[in-house]
Amino acid sequence: MLKRNIQLVFSTNVLMLCSGVVTSLLSARALGPAGRGDLMVVLMWPAIFSMVAQIGLPQAYRFCSAKRPQCVSALFSNALIFTIIMGLLMLAFAEWVIPHLIGERSPEVLRLSRIYLLTIPILMLTDLTRGLLEGARRFTWVGALRLILFGVQLASYIVLWLVGKLTVASATYTMIASLFASLLLSLFAVWHQLRPAWGPRLSELQVTLRYGIRDYPGVLTEFVNWRMDLMMLVGMASSTAVGLYVVALRLADITSILASSVGDALMPEVAASKEPDEATRVVTRSLRLTLVAHLLTLVPLWIAAPYVLRFAYGRDFVPVTNVLRMLMFASVAWSAGAILISGLNGLGHPGLSAFARIISALAMAGMLLSWLPRWGIQGAALASIIGYSVMFLVALFWFMRLRKISLWSCLRPRWDDLPTSLLPAGLGARLSRIAGRPQSERLASIIE
């Protein structure tokens, strides 16, 4: 089941990545570094406001719907009420504070930023319903609602590009339409797959809030860690610098696609596991495979970086080559940490995963404040490497301590880690038999 879910999520993420790269390329070509930076200023903050207003409930919904499927009706009803109340309150707060967060921008950018704030309730309800679907392991539908988000955006960008009307304003309205389409599909998916009845329940809200609040600091700091560099750039740097950095981030995200896929499927699978040893094995194997995959992709991407920037985005983006390479290393550390964070959450320890992300956020904030004014976007990339590494090491420490395993047993590559179904006929079975023998016998078998 885990393998199938990972394949579904991975396939979806590949398509999303391809769509994201194309839309990033089109917007970069049409808007240039400065216009691309203005678009990021408009699009970034509503997702953060939405996450703040959710109080960790999407993660709690994943956990509770995986553990107690009979509570889906109460969870869904509570989600609707919660979104109406908290969404409107956060929308009012965001309207008041947004001018102070985006720095000195043009009147059009400020106007578009305020319009895009209307997506806050849409983002909130979509995340909660997606949490229900992921907890119930309906990953086909989760993939569909993600694909429609990027599909509408991609199709609209292509049309706007062809008619010469891809601007910051038209891109903003396209994103609003994409988010609304994703919300409608998520509501239909929950109704079709889970058949919730109307039945809000205060006791169920209390249960989900207890879980969510424990993980809430970690959810916020994970997102802040992931995009703290960009958040500070938006407030302190020029639109041109932001635009260059955004392109580097988009390309560096290619190396984190596997970890995102595994992490999305891993948490509900671990939560539903009945055997502690099986849960440990699933997490450690996922971690090892993720690290190996990253190391294999890092070298060719490192070499190709300047050529990709030159031929895909244009000469104006070539100066960001070194930043892109640094962000690739940051992506490796983030991906490894994300696997462990999902494992800790699935084992019912959201507080420990939150602790790892908080420590990471504090470390990254200090370095950004020091390095960003001095070294610009290169300082932001270096701070990301250090911050993500801290998250990975702290999460690894808590996971090993909880499961009572050593670093060697956690990270040591094993033959049975290989996806034997992808190997030539007979070789997978032979490697599986070799993996079960003593070390001296394994070596002899390999030599044969």
Image: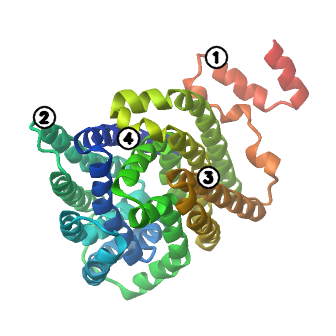
Position of 407 relative to 72 (above/below)? above
C-beta proximity under 8 Å, tags 1 and 3: no
Marked residue nearer the N-terminal end (4 or 1): 4
State how far apart marks 1 and 3 are (Cα).
41 Å
Amino acid type, mark 2: Leu
In the image, 393: left or right of 311?
Answer: right
Marked residue nearer the N-terminal end (3 or 4): 4
Q: In the orientation shown, which residue stands out farthest toward the bottom? A: 202
Mark 2 closeness class: few <14, some 14–19, many ≥20 residues within 10 Å: few
Residue beneath the point at 49% across and 70% down: 220
Residue beneath the point at 33% across and 43% down: 20
Marked residue nearer the N-terminal end (2 or 1): 2
Mark 4 closeness class: few <14, some 14–19, many ≥20 residues within 10 Å: some
State how far apart marks 4 and 1 are (Cα).
34 Å
Amino acid type, mark 4: Leu
Which residue corresponds to mark 1? 426
C-beta proximity under 8 Å, tags 4 and 2: no
Marked residue nearer the N-terminal end (1 or 3): 3
Q: Which residue is nearer to you in this view: 385 or 407?
A: 385
Label at residue 17: 4
Label at residue 162: 2
Mark 3 closeness class: few <14, some 14–19, many ≥20 residues within 10 Å: many
Can see residue 96?
A: yes
Marked residue nearer the N-terminal end (4 or 2): 4
Q: Which residue is nearer to you in this view: 135 or 298?
A: 298
State how far apart marks 4 and 2 are (Cα).
22 Å
